């Protein structure tokens, strides 16, 4: 299978490395509007460099594309590829507006190609262990969920032409950084979001960025369980993300890629993260390889990829509801599936 990676920034490193280690895949091309980035990636992986997406589609004719571009390009590039019958694996978020999400879901429905969203943390060993315990109700039913994301972004992070802008990034910490945590809260705890009460703030670099750096939200799930969600990029360090799933008999904790069970104050470790061979940033984790492998296994074996535009779009619906709630000063109900 011939694959093109579109966008040669930081996160593309994980996609390219994973693809280069798969026997069933050939990296046929890379694309970036910055010639130096595309040329460097093409040289490293022995493929063709393109500087325009449409030209690549026309000349290279790949079987799949990986979209690793700025957020505002995710929908138009995905829709274009799907309309030509090309499989798409898109970095998060798959969309930054309800209109874009609807367009993407329709394109997926009309295409015979496979579409996937890259929520790689779902494939972390810790997340798999905890989700299994929750699904089997080993410690009883879920009663509450909470999460914290305390990270740091300085002025240099926003020095390009799209980070920190509403038009191109679509939002700040809720859209870019903590969206993985927001997704894991719902997925690992097995919940369906009914409504959201949210507040967003910009407490750091106010004169530099247009987007929020801090978000607080309460998710009310359909079974009456609540999820408390706090995230910021205005801290001074990048600390491990913490997700607590409070069950009837114990609390299950994800801390980075570590997993614990807490019973009456006693903590037992369920999984210890392996931080060797990390590519890129530590908090990206090591799930990309597993997710990408599963994506192609689904294609080869005609199996549904679990994080498509419907499932992967739930996180988009949630952060859009957070923004709407913050603006209205009231809870916002999500549309039912």
Image: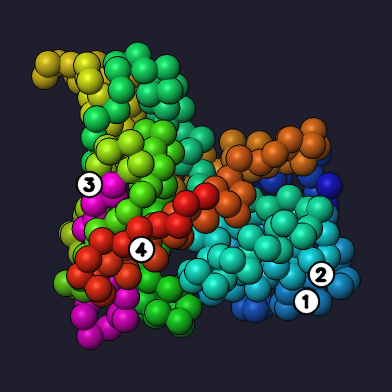
Residue found 66% across the figure and 36% down from its top = 294
Q: Secondary structure at mark 4?
A: helix
Real-space CA distance between mark 1 and mark 2, rounded to the nearest whole angstrom = 5 Å
Instruction: Residue 148: say if magenta.
Output: no
* Dot placed on the residue nearer the N-terminal end, 1 or 4: 1
Q: Which residue is mark 4?
A: 321
Instruction: Residue 207: say if magenta.
Output: yes
Residues packed near mark 1 inside 10 Å, few (<14), some (14 to 19) or many (20 plus): some
Q: Is residue 333 above or below residue 222?
A: below
Real-space CA distance between mark 1 and mark 4, rounded to the nearest whole angstrom = 33 Å
Q: Which residue is mark 1?
A: 54
Q: Are marks 1 and 3 in contact (CB under 8 Å)?
A: no
Which of labels 2 and 4 is toward the front?
4
Residue found 30% across the figure and 80% down from its top = 209
Q: Are marks 3 and 4 in contact (CB under 8 Å)?
A: no
Q: x, y (%) of residue 316?
A: 46, 60
Q: Secondary structure at mark 2?
A: helix
Q: Residue 57: which numbered mark, if any?
A: 2
Q: Which residue is mark 3?
A: 228
* Dot placed on the residue nearer the N-terminal end, 2 or 3: 2
Residue found 35% across the figure and 41% down from its top = 222
Q: Magenta segment range?
A: 205-220
Which of labels 1 and 3 is toward the front?
3
Outermost residue to the left: 265
Residues packed near mark 2 inside 10 Å, few (<14), some (14 to 19) or many (20 plus): some
Real-space CA distance between mark 2 and mark 3, rounded to the nearest whole angstrom = 43 Å
* Dot placed on the residue nearer the N-terminal end, 2 or 4: 2
Real-space CA distance between mark 1 and mark 3, rounded to the nearest whole angstrom = 43 Å
Q: Is residue 57 left or right of residue 93?
A: right
Q: Toward which corner of the image does residue 6 lie, by quadrant?
A: bottom right
Q: x, y (%) of residue 52?
A: 73, 78
């Amino acid at each position: 299978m011939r694959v093109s990676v579109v966008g040669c920034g930081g996160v593309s490193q994980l996609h390219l490395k994973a693809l280069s280690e798969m026997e069933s895949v050939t990296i046929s091309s890379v694309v970036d509007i910055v010639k130096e980035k595309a040329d460097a990636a093409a040289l490293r992986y022995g493929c063709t460099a393109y500087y325009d997406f449409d030209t690549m589609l026309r000349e290279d004719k790949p079987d799949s594309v990986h979209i690793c571009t700025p957020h505002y390009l995710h929908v138009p590039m995905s829709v274009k590829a799907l309309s030509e019958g090309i499989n798409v694996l898109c970095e998060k978020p798959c969309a930054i507006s309800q209109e874009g999400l609807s367009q993407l879901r329709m394109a997926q429905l009309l295409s015979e190609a496979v579409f996937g969203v890259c929520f790689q943390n779902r494939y972390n060993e810790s997340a798999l262990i905890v989700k299994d315990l929750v699904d089997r109700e080993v410690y009883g039913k879920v009663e509450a969920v909470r999460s914290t994301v305390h990270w740091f972004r300085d002025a240099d992070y926003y020095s390009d032409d799209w980070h920190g802008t509403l038009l191109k990034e679509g939002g700040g910490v809720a859209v870019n950084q903590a969206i993985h945590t927001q997704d894991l809260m719902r997925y690992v705890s097995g919940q369906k979001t009914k409504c959201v009460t949210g507040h967003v703030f910009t407490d750091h670099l106010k004169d530099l960025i247009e987007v929020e750096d801090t978000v607080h939200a309460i998710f009310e799930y359909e079974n009456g369980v609540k999820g408390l969600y706090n995230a910021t990029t205005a801290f001074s360090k990048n600390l491990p993300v913490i997700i607590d799933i409070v069950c009837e008999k114990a609390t299950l904790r994800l801390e980075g890629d570590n997993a614990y069970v807490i019973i009456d104050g006693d903590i037992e470790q369920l999984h210890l993260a392996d931080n060797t061979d990390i590519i890129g940033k530590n908090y990206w984790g090591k799930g990309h390889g597993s997710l990408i492998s599963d994506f192609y296994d689904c294609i080869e074996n005609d199996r549904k990829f679990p994080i498509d535009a419907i499932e992967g779009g739930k996180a988009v619906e949630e952060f859009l509801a957070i923004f709407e709630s913050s603006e209205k000063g009231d809870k916002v109900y999500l549309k039912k599936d």
